Image (spheres, rainbow, N blue to C red):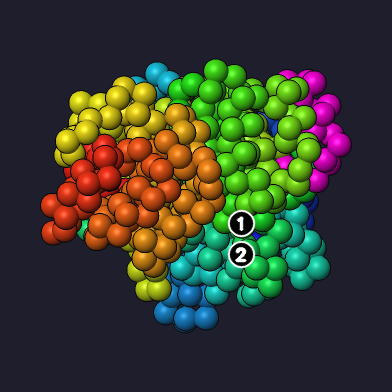
Amino acid sequence: MKIKTALVSVSSKEGLVPFVKELAGLGIKIVSTGGTARALKQEGLAIQTVEELTGFPEMLDGRVKTLHPKVHGGILANRTDLDHVKQLKEQGIEAIDLVVVNLYPFKETIAKPHASLEEIIENIDIGGPTLIRAAAKNHEFVSVVVNPEWYEFVLEEIRKTGSTSLETRRKLAREAFEYTAWYDALIGQWLGKRFGKPEEFPERFTAPFEKRQALRYGENPHQHAAFYQEPLVAEPCIASAQQVQGKELSFNNVADADAALELVKEFREPAAVIVKHNNPCGAAQAKTLSEAFRDAFECDQTAAFGGVIALNRACDESTAKQIASFFNEIVAAPDFEPAALEALKAKPNVRLLKVPGLESGTTAKRLSLRKVAGGLLVQDDDQVVFDHKTLKVVTRKEPGKEQLDALLFAFTVAKHVKSNAIVLAQGTKTVGIGAGQMSRIDSTEMAVKKAGERAQGAVLASDAFFPFPDNVEATAKAGVSAVIQPGGSVKDPEVIAAADRHGLAMVFTGLRHFKH
């Protein structure tokens, strides 16, 4: 069936005028509302207003304008149902074949720093989603366009046949329902944050995400992938990163960059983190960024090859030259000094990501999501902060202040290492990391092996309790001086006794940091 009448009501006027001009030029009648009608009339287009169509004025400050049988009857009628056709004729209702609608700018309104509650509520669209859903439901006969990117494609089909194909209408309907679902999810999320309790988990979980970019590939080259971001995320993160150099990002690039950024945000002093396969292989903070990077790199130079680097200060020339001396995939920093960019030009494929705000290290309260087959796991993000006062010394030997600082640093890094996690540190630099082993003693032995002689006098952090004294035995044999762990094992007395026997200091946190 040829498209004879189009209803146009949009908030975003992008590409609208040339699109509607051509529709009108093809003999299609244009019905429009409010500001859209005024914008089109200013261009000299002949427009029938919705008030003229329905015989009713816009009401309640524009809250009611298209909610009328002459609008929705014209959209929802089955054109092949003789009874529907008869009813339209009896009620003087004209069929509407094309609906072009996008919604009030709710996302943009809540992003305003000083938007009032009244302004936000007024930008919750009612008539728009209703029009879109009606047209999408009746897509066998009606085309619905919510995205200006479709304007030219739709015009091309109308030029050829006077209508759109059923295949196109189905694609448009799918996008329309995804659009209204996203819009409602955004409103629901905002209401939950504004008026709900942070600890509440809703009975029906919806989360609005927008496609940021297609990715080169997924975890493996034969897998397709895309990166979606949450709207209105204010904190520095991978979703807010601006790429200033290098190849396109892959799935693994984004995942590793996220892991590196989340760890480097833990530190307030100049810090550097190197991540490989979602695990830190080196982390350090120091008086200068260059020193911090050197310390992080020296933790495990072999594993750092092909890694992802995150810095919490603007990358300077000295640090950039160190980075340029070996192969790595990504460097993320709040900024890049001109001399640093010049030094990194020698590695044109290295992806440079600018992430402003990393210096503050702020982390907003948020939920952690993980997709499983057939469902979704949702939890509070692990953002517990420890200090000296929260630690319990359980051995005869007490750690000194410098040891306590090193223990807290190591335990912070362990939080970002896949469990079972063991981290060895000298001061505020890692010297050995054991990650992701099925047995904790295997992770301990791995960390000790990587540290080598640097284990002498180091401190050790374990993300969960020592189930047996064998971890203490291996730790003491390597020359480690102090241990931090959550405690809570039935074998705690034996573990503590082993630490006392070897002259180790041990503190309990009372909380673990599993990362699966």
Which secondary structure lies at badge 1? helix
Question: In the rendered view of the protein, which quadrant contains the C terminus?
Answer: bottom left
- Whichever of labels 2 and 1 marks the residue nearer the N terminus, that label is 2
Q: Is 341 within the magenta?
A: yes
Q: Residue at coordinates 62% horizontally, 39% vertically from top-left?
A: 298
Crowding at dot 1, Cα within 10 Å, few <14 / some 14-19 / many 20+, comes out as: some
Q: Which mark is residue 252?
A: 1
**Splitting the image into 4 quarters, where does residue 257 fall?**
top right
Q: Is residue 394 above or below residue 223?
A: above
The answer to whether residue 321 is visible is: yes
Q: Residue at coordinates 75% horizontally, 54% vertically from top-left?
A: 152
In the picture of the structure, the residue carrying the numbered disc 2 is 219
Tell me where residue 384 appears, x and y as whole percent.
28, 37
Q: Are marks 2 and 1 in contact (CB under 8 Å)?
A: yes
Q: Amino acid at mark 2?
A: Glu
Which secondary structure lies at badge 2? loop
Q: Residue at coordinates 71% horizontally, 58% vertically from top-left?
A: 216
Q: Is residue 491 left or right of residue 430?
A: left
Q: Is 104 within the magenta?
A: no
Q: Is residue 145 above or below residue 44?
A: below
Tell me where residue 60 appears, x and y as whole percent.
32, 33
State the extent of the magenta-drawn residues as a range: 337-351
Q: Closer to the camera, 98 or 70?
A: 98
Q: Is residue 17 above or below residue 67?
A: above
Tell me where residue 447 appears, x and y as whole percent.
47, 52
Q: Amino acid at mark 1?
A: Asn
Q: Closer to the camera, 483 or 383?
A: 483
Question: In the rendered view of the protein, which quadrant contains the N terminus?
Answer: bottom right
